[in-house]
Image (tube, rainbow, N blue to C red):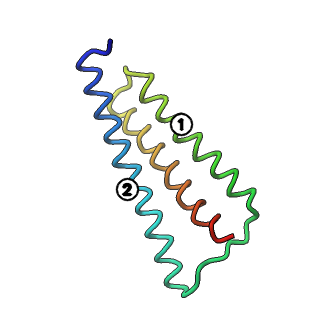
Amino acid sequence: MISHKRRKNLRGALLITGVLSFAAVLISYLVQKRSESRLGIQCSYFDPPLIDILAFSAALFLICEGLYQILEYHALSSKDKIFVAIRVAFGFAILTLHFMQFIYK
């Protein structure tokens, strides 16, 4: 059974990770849409779909590895939890950008 303190720390780490991830997705989306509107076109990306698949894989790795660290390593310091949360947020940002690029192909 997880102690009350560990449960509270886990809940806080997951909350921070969720908020940072949501912000990363929102910022990535808005930057991408703003760039498209400035150009006046929906961008057609020249990278082959394999690049997007590799980026999806890397992003999913960042997300899964970060969440695994948060869930498994309860003894992480607050500083380490923030760095893991940032890593997960970057994973979501990469996932968002490459998903947006992939739908245009």
Residue indicated by mark 2: 23
**Image quadrant in which you'd find residue 4:** top left
Q: How many marks?
A: 2
Q: Position of residue 57 (x, y in %)?
A: 65, 46
Looking at the image, which residue is at 67% across and 76% down? 44
Residue indicated by mark 1: 64
Q: Position of residue 46 (x, y in %)?
A: 73, 71
Pick whichever of labels 2 and 1 is earlier in the sequence. Answer: 2
| For residue 101, side relative to residue 30 (left or right) | right
Q: Position of residue 7 (x, y in %)?
A: 28, 23
Q: Position of residue 3 (x, y in %)?
A: 27, 15
- The residue nearer to you, when weighing 90 against 19, is 19
Determine crowd level at label 1: few under 14, some 14-19, many 20+ residues with C-alpha closer than 10 A.
Answer: some
Distance CA(mark 2)–CA(mark 1): 18 Å
Q: Give the SS element for disc 1.
A: helix
Looking at the image, which residue is at 32% across and 28% down? 10
Query: Is 77 drawn above or below residue 91 in the view shown?
Result: above
**Image quadrant in which you'd find residue 97:** bottom right
- Mark 1: which amino acid? Cys
Q: Give the SS element for disc 2.
A: helix
Determine crowd level at label 2: few under 14, some 14-19, many 20+ residues with C-alpha closer than 10 A.
Answer: some
Looking at the image, which residue is at 44% across and 57% down? 25
- Mark 2: which amino acid? Ala
